[in-house]
Image (cartoon, rainbow, N blue to C red):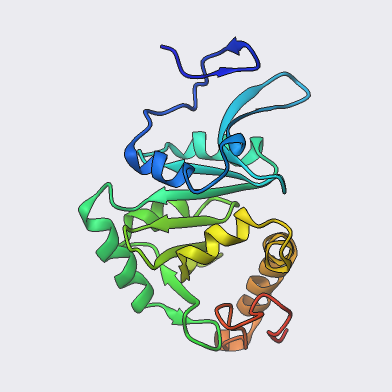
Amino acid sequence: MWHWAHEGSRFCDPWWENETEWHRAWKGQFPVNWQEVVHQTATGERHIADVKTDRGWVIEFQHSYLKPEERRSRDAFYPKLIWVVDGTRRKRDRAQLISAWKAGVPVGGNSLVRKAFSDDCGLLREWAGSNAPIFFDLGEMERLWWLFAKSSTGSAYVQPFPRAQFIAWHRSPATEAARQFDEFVSDILPKMIADYESRPQAQPLGWDPLQPRGLRRSFRF
């Protein structure tokens, strides 16, 4: 099967999946030269990234079910990976995720960041084990749902996040917000979760990521 031609050569990527209109709509949010970029390791392993920004973030748009072992392989292959997952593929997923978030324990000062249990939510069960940032697209025009990480108690940290801001972060790499995203994912977020889980009765942290300059160090450790 012909996939794409890159630098005059063709190769079959085992991670490739049939491209849907959903894929094309998301990829179209980014410059053409960021799309379908070959990423190769020193060992010669090569895969095609859906989008690779000029800040080095690989954004993979996943529509179909992904086996855990393949997800772990991709997490390990790309040093800076973001997943955008199609949450409209199964009708039950949207209701389950929103229900899990509503029933969750507030973590941030604005109650948008919540510790949600994954037992009754298929998306959380399938994706909470990833170390990469995950954004669920539930077909809502205004927002995505950001899954941070899985906790030691089997729950996950989830919050709604503006779709437009996600796109702006990665289309405008020179902005301060984009640089803060890098710092937040690699340093601040792991410390914030570890600190929260170590608090007696999991007392809320004073952090509001949706306020202006919300990615600054406005939360308290």
Taking the spot 73% from the left edge, 84% from the top edge, the residue there is 221
Taking the spot 62% from the left edge, 79% from the top edge, the residue there is 196
Residue 212 is situated, as x and y percent measured from the top left of the image, at: 62, 82
- What residue occupies the far left of the structure in this picture? 91
Q: In this view, does 191 lie to the left or right of 72?
A: right
Of residues 206 and 203, which is closer to you in this image? 206
Quadrant of the rendered image containing residue 43: top right
Q: In this view, does 169 lie above or below 205?
A: above
Of residues 194 and 173, which is closer to you in this image? 173
The answer to whether residue 7 is visible is yes
Quadrant of the rendered image containing residue 103: bottom left
Where, quadrant-wise, is the N terminus in this rendering?
Answer: top left
- What residue occupies the far right of the structure in this picture? 42
Taking the spot 53% from the left edge, 58% from the top edge, the residue there is 167
In this rendering, the count of numbered labels is 0
Residue 29 is situated, as x and y percent measured from the top left of the image, at: 49, 49
Taking the spot 33% from the left edge, 39% from the top edge, the residue there is 21
Q: Is residue 189 above or below residue 109?
A: above
